[in-house]
Image: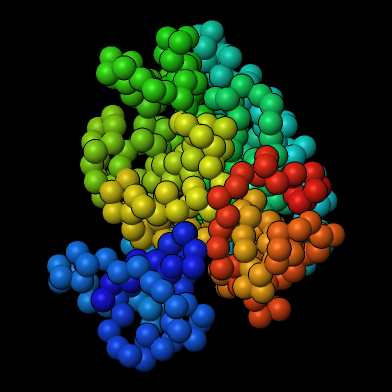
Amino acid sequence: MFVTAVADGWVPLSQGVSGIPGYVHSADEILALARQGYREVFVDMRAAVSGGRRVSRFTDGNAQARDLDRELERLPDGQRGTVISAQRDDPMGEQLDARVRMVRACYGETLRVVGELFTAAAQGRSVRMSLAREAVQLALDTVPNDSAAWFWAARLEQYGAWLHVHSVNVFALSLQFGLDLGLKREALTCLGVAALLHDVGQTRLPVDLMGRRGPFTDDQEQIFRTHCAEGEALLRQQPDVPPSVLRSVREHHERHDGKGYPDGLAGDRRGLFGRILALADALERMMGTGSQGERVSPAQAVNLLYAGRGRAHAEEDLERFIRFAGVFPPGSMVRISDGRYGMVWRHDPEHPLSPLVNVAYDETRRPISPVRVPLAAEGLRAEQAMRVQLEQTHPQRLAPA
């Protein structure tokens, strides 16, 4: 049978995390699930009868994102590096408060730069690419290896023009994912510049469409879709813009299934940076101020993103991205296996179901004095993501800094 999710949590667990979803072939594998505490699972009958990939992903819990890894191996020498896990050097989150404060200062400066660049583009003036590169360097020099600090900076930002805030949030996610992939500084600079300016083409749209989150009429949708090509054209007019930046700005709304725009590229015809931007853009729109419709919790955003696997995003890319972002990203409210509730401060890539949690409610959901609990060290796990938003759970009480 093909198990798609466990029943004690509404967030399906990704491949390469706990092996779910995947085929379960034997009584031993069912027993292994039971020993993890699961009593009910959801089964995809279509996969069960379609003769899909008969590989037991439950027993291969560390399955790698092979296609993405191969592409990374093809990068020129010096373009890959090593990231030290913040979970290892700060397992209790003792440095997270200070790191979030540092990142928020950097975030504010980056937001100012984006405003200046987009204003110049809207007014037909030259876009100072040196400012964009300097913003990337500042970000790389400010707590570069703690993605949780950047997640929190984005979650706690409440002010600024939507298009500018969205651009900085996509920039933060993309740059941190690039670090997680092992890209080195030269490649990260190109990725960061592209992420910062991925929506600069929207400055060429009619004022009523620029930064709009929908819904659109058919005619408005067609006009809005021109912003990718417009962004590429605008940046081509600037000196010394790397081809990888131009390409990824154009491709950030392409889809794995070829149903994206502007060129309908599919599969590996899309470049690595464009695929990274597409993932970061999608996640930010779901969980951030840029989402169309109601803002959702981080864990629900990951759930929605995973639902598009094989269509909007390559399955391998998405698995790798969720390993980076977490099944329960920072800001997720979770129920812990001991019955208490808390907010995820930082996810643990080595123990994806056992993040660092700021526990703030007892088993009866009564508020308690918050205490940080590294679930992996305590032999606990997050059992369920709660459908609540950060704003509804008093971020000043539960969030870092």
Give the tally of numbered discs: 0
Q: Residue at x 44, y 46 (%)?
A: 279
Percent x, y of residue 326: 54, 59
Quadrant of the rendered image containing residue 385 = bottom right
Left or right relative to 91: residue 40: left
Against 123, residue 318 (above or below) is below
Q: In the displayed image of the protein, which residue is found farthest to the front?
A: 364
Percent x, y of residue 373: 74, 69
Q: Residue at x 45, y 10 (%)?
A: 208
Left or right relative to 392: residue 188: left
Q: Residue at x 46, y 73 (%)?
A: 18
Left or right relative to 75: residue 176: right
Q: What kind of colouring is applied to the model shown?
A: rainbow
Pick the front one: 328 or 277 = 328
Pick the front one: 2 or 90 = 2
Q: In the displayed image of the protein, which residue is found farthest to the bottom?
A: 28
Regarding residue 21, the answer to whether it shows in the image is no
Against 118, residue 263 (above or below) is below
Q: Residue at x 49, y 64 (%)?
A: 9
Percent x, y of residue 61: 43, 77
Percent x, y of residue 107: 70, 36
Regarding residue 55, the answer to whether it shows in the image is yes
Quadrant of the rendered image containing residue 1 = bottom left
Pick the front one: 133 or 21 = 21
